[in-house]
Image (cartoon, coloured by chain):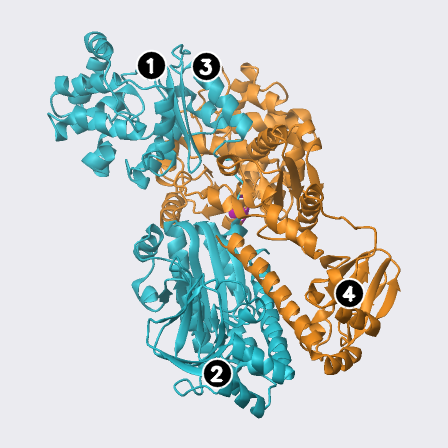
Chain colours: A cyan, B orange
Amino acid sequence: MAIEFCGHASVAETIGVEPSGDSFNSIRLGPDNRPFNPMVNAGAIACSALIQAKDPSGAFERIQSCLSDFAGRDLAVDEDVYRSESETGDRNRAIAWLLRNNQVLRGDVDAALDVYFRQCALLVNARDLSVMGATLANNGVNPLTGRQVVSPLTAARTLSVMVSSGMYDYSGEWIYRVGLPAKSGVGGGIVAALPAQVGLGTYSPPLDELGNSVRGLKVCEEFSSHFGLHLLERQGDVKSAVAAEYDLAQVHSHRDRRPEDQEILERFGDSASILELAGALNFVSCDYISRKLLTGKYREIQIFDFRRVSGMSAAAAKLLSVMFEAMIDEGTRVIVTGLPGDSFTAQTLRRYAKDDVLDATRSFETLNDGAAWAEDQVIFTHGGFSQMSSEIDLREQSLLRDLTDAQVATLAAAAEMEEYRGGARIIQAGLPGDSIYFLTQGMVSVVLDSGVRVATLDAGTCFGELVLISREEPRAANIISDSPSRCFRIRLDAMDKLSAEQPEIMEIILRNLAGLLSERLRHANSKIDALAR
Amino acid sequence: MAIEFCGHASVAETIGVEPSGDSFNSIRLGPDNRPFNPMVNAGAIACSALIQAKDPSGAFERIQSCLSDFAGRDLAVDEDVYRSESETGDRNRAIAWLLRNNQVLRGDVDAALDVYFRQCALLVNARDLSVMGATLANNGVNPLTGRQVVSPLTAARTLSVMVSSGMYDYSGEWIYRVGLPAKSGVGGGIVAALPAQVGLGTYSPPLDELGNSVRGLKVCEEFSSHFGLHLLERQGDVKSAVAAEYDLAQVHSHRDRRPEDQEILERFGDSASILELAGALNFVSCDYISRKLLTGKYREIQIFDFRRVSGMSAAAAKLLSVMFEAMIDEGTRVIVTGLPGDSFTAQTLRRYAKDDVLDATRSFETLNDGAAWAEDQVIFTHGGFSQMSSEIDLREQSLLRDLTDAQVATLAAAAEMEEYRGGARIIQAGLPGDSIYFLTQGMVSVVLDSGVRVATLDAGTCFGELVLISREEPRAANIISDSPSRCFRIRLDAMDKLSAEQPEIMEIILRNLAGLLSERLRHANSKIDALAR
């Protein structure tokens, strides 16, 4: 709290961070006349005095409120304990006057001591201590209230001093045996914290000769050893930073394209690669990612999906920046997806990555949007989109492949041409289907009732075709026209009539439908393989 | 090395683990007459003496070989440095005699000192130091040679003493600013290690007044701060421990079942749940898993897949054991898959989990095998498998659904009944397909040329049906008869003949095929959703 309220420089010049080798209530100061560290009485008094000097009348309420935020509930003072401390704390008075003599404490000694005695009398139980520990372990965010009580850096600094000096003269033995940053109090409490994992609180007043709770020590040692919580016994797995890796020849976006464009993707899609990242990215996981990319040649397009990334350290952001830069220098187009601009991860990236590198990357809200854009590039580069603006002939429909021109004409004669304005709902989810639609111009999307867009269809593709398999089934999703669009719509009864007259038409269409589904299944299985390496 | 060669008890009674507060070459011992810790001269001499006492003639070679294993190359002695150390090391001689006076060193003082002087003269460079650090960071396994140099526990103990005392009197400041376990040497080297992430070595002789390399300190501080390597600034993500979660109604095993059994799975498959775990499991990730399971009711069958689990702490194993036990007590059948018995993870689980709990769980080599077994249970419980031993009528085939009895009879008349012994290859990958097969008795598997079994088919299902879509395509996989089996085989030419005479038969079959593929696609997409939450 002193670091955040009074500034790190002022705390650092007032209080050291070395273990003292003396007992908790020693009056001896460090070689530079500062208290050795804030975990022994001299340092704690200096700390209270810093806060009191900055806010003479409100210091105690400030401390009370901050510690209450740590505990996640309002903490009260035990007035009896406060009075007794205040009446009998002569040794602490001596320490305070010595601090004043050394210019460490510069303000009103009695007022500073009053703040110190009062905060020493704040009532906590073991549960409060465990929540306070968890708040330190959780980068300063109280895990119960979700409130950021101190910054991540302040939490790490506090844990550091707890490691070196939190258990008085037992600190070396403690880190050796228990391996948790911890702070002992002569009231009989211990608060311990394992970063990103757990907070632990114990309370039992009988103390050993060093001032640590006898039972607290035993419990913490047993608990840490039983559950393997030692800070330095760590197993990591950098590989879990990459959830999936594939290219656009193996897995497509949810955009149905004309057969000739689809074919370009099958042939050239390996020029665009996708890495789906996951978890909390740090130095070593980003190092792993960059080595992984370096083993091959950089692709023309590289997509990094962040949807499942839960956090990013400064190191990760810097390494990603260096990696992006190297790729961009080689002519690779770098795409970032699934990273909302207001997310903490995006903020970290903006803060630590080079601006010109970020400017040169392209960002899409979803992986699917990014993949569809990359596909567009691949198709365009390889001569696709030849007739994008004109109307697509029915004969180019995959579903109608292998039909003779005469058969297609027969089908067209049985169809109705429909036009939709942008935003129109062509098919409504939940209603039984009665038609197949062949999109000849414009673009439509498959949209769930929840509003989620699951696929986009280009002119030259069809929709509603599953009525051919099961005509009673209600439609699974809405079809919305993204732009003004035109469709050939063939009703099932017209289809039935046609089928009775020319059964080979239906046979060919059903065979094509099975072929389309088989192709989609192949892509789906390819995605499963990529996701479940 | 002393811990492993001489035993932890003997080291612990000889050398402490508290910071001394004195300089590296202090002759002052701790309150119990032991050296404060092994990181200052007194402790290091005591350490060498322990090893020398246990192996009087081979001690130095032992140390040289162990340190060489740490560095991953053979380290040599600089004889000039050794002679100079040996001739001028009077202060170290004094320390050794004081240790002998205090019964800490009990053997031959000159011989112990000779071992100490020699090991002080082993030549390393910054790269060696970084590999040594990486070995400590990597649970005692040299990451370049893959050799286990010391046990994970010894590595953690060493890192602990490095945290409290490795940087002499600067240790508190170091952990505060740099936050890495580290050991400084007055030769000008520093070795630092971040567990499960990185080893760091620096070498530059000019020292500050505390005995630490001036440039080494600066580089380590800059490097740690630039890349956010502080031990206590950690972000975690417990959620990445669960890669996917689904039940057997959403996703099926790769076993094709008869339509009525398939239907039972659709209705009752939610009684069997699957959790695919991933990464290095620890206390907090297993706590997350058990809370996740507790939010619902335990299912009748719970599968835990470990294929992507890269490691497991003792705590994880204990928590899993408690969780398994609670589930088994509630009547849940617990299945473990993808955990080979000889893997380190399986060994950890066997070591820390209760035997009777493990005895009550069932293990399968692959998730697919486990899921297939669970499906069998669900189907059996709900009245399936009614005709497992008898021959399945063609009319029960999904592909022939909606055909009249007369149409099925026509088809059967065009088919040949074939019998295969167990192990026979019915279809060979790579050859063009010419028939569809309806399995009426026995079981067959879809096997890739690599030997991987990708699916198993029950009597009542069909295979080779994709020739109906694309007859030129070579078969993608082999079909091997798992047991004696019988099939109706219909050749494509017979099919064509039939189709010309009765086109409605082909239309119905193609519609059914599209329906089957559409169903498989639905399950594949369901699995993708589960894997990519």
In the picture of the structure, the residue carrying the numbered disc 4 is B438
Along the viewing direction, whichever of B8 and A367 lies nearer the viewer: A367
Along the viewing direction, whichever of A326 and B371 lies nearer the viewer: B371
Query: Start and end of the magenta stretch?
Result: B128-132
Pointer 1 chain: A
In the picture of the structure, the residue carrying the numbered disc 2 is A415
**Label 3 packing within 10 angstroms: few (<14), some (14-19), many (20+):** some
Pointer 3 chain: A
Q: Is residue A300 above or below residue B28?
A: below
In this view, the mark in front (4 or 3): 4
The mark nearer the N terminus, 2 or 1, is 1
Amino acid residing under circle 2 = Ala
Can residue B129 be seen at all in this image of the molecule? no
Residues under labels 4 and 1: Cα distance? 79 Å
In this view, the mark in front (4 or 1): 4
Amino acid residing under circle 1 = Gly
In the picture of the structure, the residue carrying the numbered disc 3 is A215
Residue B30 pos. (x, y %): 46, 18
The mark nearer the N terminus, 1 or 3, is 1
Q: Name the residue rendered at 62%, 74% in the picture.
A: A515
